[in-house]
Image: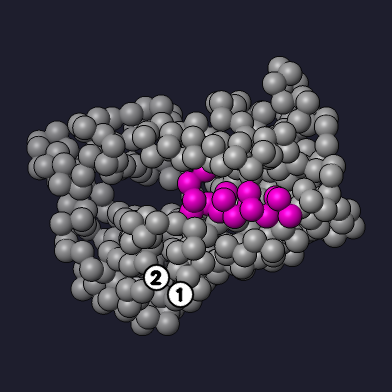
Amino acid sequence: MRAHGHDARVVSISAGADHSYVSHDSGLPLYCYPTVSDLKTSFSTDEEETFNPALVYWPVTWRSGLKGNSVWHPWTCATVAYHGGCCYNAGHVRAAMRHMPFRSLRTLMVETYVPKHILVRKLRKLGVIGVLCMTDLTRRMFAQAGWPKEKAIAIPPGLPPDDSGTTDMPSNGCLENIHSGLPYVLFLGNPLPIRGIYVLLSASRKVFANNKNSRIVCLLRPDPGKEMTSAREGILRKVKELGVEERFICITRKLTTNEIRQSIKNARAVAMPFLYIPSEIPLGILEAMQMGTPVITSESGGTSEYLGDCGWVVPPGNVDALANAVFSALQDAETRQRKADACREKMALHPTWETVGDAWLEFGLSALKGLPV
């Protein structure tokens, strides 16, 4: 948007921050505030009053309809609401309850059961001019809840430039034994139960019993914080208890981008068996597909609908179904190749971030003029 001559700015509400600040790490100014109230307070100063946008893209969730206007932005201008997903159903809740404590499910359950028309009614009352969704599933849910179809659009997350050629670079020997050894299925992300890692661990025992020459490799992000540290310690402890450390391999150190990409490229499949998918089409799935690596994920509406023939879709929390998918990825070369080809075909048509930026801008400007999508 800035490349097109617009003074586009990014505002981040970060609960982890203890003060307001401006970051330039991303190559453009990122205005960070601990709360929306801090944003409003800062906006009331003389320094910030000079920025009066004509259009704001503001994030919403289904539970936003239950909240007051204190979480809304301070500018009296046109607004496009964008929704990241969270289109769950009762089946997802039941599956997650078998693997997650209730306290971790409360927010997700609200997202599942809150009537969707409450958010639509609030957006109408606030005069929102358009709704931007990540998938067609979310767009359809807005339409079913009463939002005008002509004022909503689905724009998926974008792809970075394809630099897959760099995956042939050496990884300093850190992962060479894994890449050159037995075939493996790769898990990416943090080890919170919501991501299905404990389901994958249970499924791996069935896979290992039937396939002596296979492994599960988990690249566990070294995210900071007490919760993440506890989650990493918990899964490592469980793996040790089961005595599968040699085959269910957990790597917790910080990896380079190249090391991660090499690991994806050399995997038979990337497993992301979420119990709930907190946002639609996680970027890890797109990155795997971009390199022609099929994905194993859970039935989740928007993400699994998008995945289609590019991977295996299993019921969330279903150990047997997940084990069968992992086994197929490891053993069935013909099926895996067909899915890899489907990944490359779909990614060839997937928008880049530049195209996504253009689409956001075009939709926002059209909505400002009152034009249909």
Of the pair 357 and 366, the residue shown nearer to us: 357
Q: Quadrant of residue 66?
A: bottom left
- Compared with 145, 106 (above or below) is above
* Nearest the eye: 231 or 261: 231
Dot 1 surroundings within 10 Å: few (below 14), some, or many (20 or more)? few
Q: Is residue 243 visible?
A: yes
Residue drawn at x 20%, y 31% is 19
What residue is pinned by disc 2?
A: 112
User: Residue 322: where, in percent of width, then height?
Assistant: 68, 60
Left or right of residue 345, residue 332 in this image? right
Q: Quadrant of the N terminus?
A: top left
Q: Amino acid at mark 2?
A: Thr
Secondary structure, magenta segment, majority class: helix
Question: Observer-nearest residue: 270 or 29?
Answer: 270
Residue 348 shows in the view: no
Given the image, on which type of amino acid does mark 1 rest? Ala
Residue 358, x across and y down, in percent: 50, 52
Q: Are marks 1 and 2 in contact (CB under 8 Å)?
A: yes
- The image position of residue 70, as x and y in percent, is 15, 57
> Which mark, residue 90?
1
